[in-house]
Amino acid sequence: MSAPGAPGPVVDVAAVTKSFRTWDRAGSWSVRHPFRRRRAGRALALSEVDLRIGRGEFVGLLGQNGAGKSTLIKLMTGLLLPEAGTVRVCGLDPYGDREANARNMGVTFGQRTQLWWDLPARDSFSILRDIHGLPADAWRGSLAELDDVLSLSAFWDTPVRFLSLGQRVRCDLAAALLHRPRVLFLDEPTIGLDVLVKDQVRELLSRLAATGDHCVVLTTHDMAEVEALCHRIVVIDRGRVVHDGPRDRLSVAGTESVFLVEFETPPPPLDLLTAEVVSREGPSVRVRPLPGADRARVTAELLAAHPVRSVRYEGATAEDVLRALHGRGREQRAGAPGAGG
């Protein structure tokens, strides 16, 4: 998808493939043959993945454990080298230009900290200021903004080893944003946090999305987070992109949103411009919005069609759709030649 307000993509992943070596024992182990030779193999993590993300986009990268999400993040951050295809972030090769690429991006990886364990968090922020070469005024201004949202100053003089999980995650997020990166990669940033801390983190991420200056890639299993923050969703299944588009276009057969309409009396046949009739039973009618029709237009047309007692929207959540996608993937694997049975 093209970037809002930008001439080209900030993140450009083209036909990327990545696999890892695996080892299996040749034959079963026994006391008489305890040192059987191992047999090498390859496990495919990503297969010809294309992904382009523009400035101002907030993208949710979703999929089951082992689908390839973290591998893709590591390729975009320069931690791994693709076997085939190309990766460019802000026009740079993340693996070959690691130092320059690090100045353009901020990264959080779940519960892995980038703070210095024995130092107070504020000292870590000072070290990061020197690493990124930030002017003192810019550093103080950025830190003040982050403190305003994340309430860091109450504990930033405490050594990191004594911080709670929620306090450390807030400091890690601040460390990733301190140098105002163009690209932000968030891999399970709120895992294990309580509700209040999650709300603080989401508030900060919402502010980032509203500025339109940052390109944000979020991987998470928290579907409430996806619904609240991500405007675009990319779904990876078994190393391939199976969906890439706006959040409200994410659908799978059997998970479409519908309206349940209760009319005052059984209505005549409905000829709607914004929806199609799915079923009807007396005064109860289910209709499915047509592509591009939002809830407000559908509701307005229903209210104008016939006297209505109630309209209830039964929308499929992102979690519903992901569950359906993964269920379909299991069925395909079970029906494939050579599948276990």
Image (cartoon, rainbow, N blue to C red):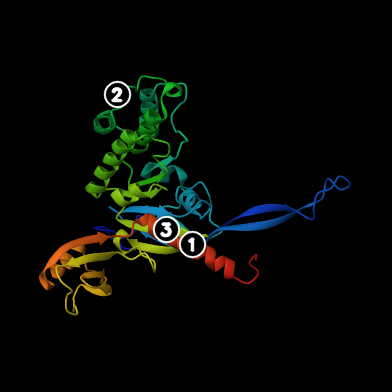
Residue at position x 40%, y 26% from top?
124
Q: Which residue is mark 2?
A: 153
Amino acid residing under circle 2: Ser
Residue drawn at point x = 65 percent, y = 69 percent: 338
Q: Amino acid at mark 3?
A: Leu
Answer whether residue 295 is visible to the viewer in this image.
Answer: yes
| Image mark for residue 327 | 1
Which callout, 1 or 2, points at the residue further toward the start of the chain?
2
Task: Estimate the spatial distance between the alpha carbons at disc 2 and disc 3, rounded to whole Å.
Answer: 39 Å
Q: Residue at x 24, y 65 (%)?
A: 260
Q: Position of residue 273 (x, y in %)?
A: 18, 76
Name the spot of residue 98 as percent of width and height, x first: 46, 45
Nearer to us: label 2 or label 3: 3
User: In terms of secondary structure, where does tag 2 sit?
Assistant: loop
Q: Give the class, few, some or many, for how many residues have Cα within 10 Å of label 2's Cα (few <14, many ≥20).
A: some
Task: Choose the circle earlier in sequence order: 3 or 1.
Answer: 3
Q: Is residue 12 above or below residue 169?
A: below
Instruction: Tell me: residue 273, above or below residue 82.
Output: below
Helix, strand or loop at mark 3: helix
Q: Is residue 129 above or below residue 272?
A: above
Location of the N terminus (image quadrant): bottom left
- Determine which residue is flagged by label 3: 322
Element type where label 1 sits in the image: helix
Quarter of the image with the C terminus is bottom right
Q: Quadrant of residue 11?
A: bottom left
Looking at the image, how many numbered discs can be counted on the residues? 3
Instruction: Tell me which label, 2 or 3, sits earlier in the chain.
Output: 2
Front-most of 299 and 147?
299
Residue 274 rendering spot, x and y as whole percentages: 20, 72
Query: Residue type at mark 1?
Result: Gly
Res. 178 visible in picture: no
The one nearer the camera, 183 or 330, is 330
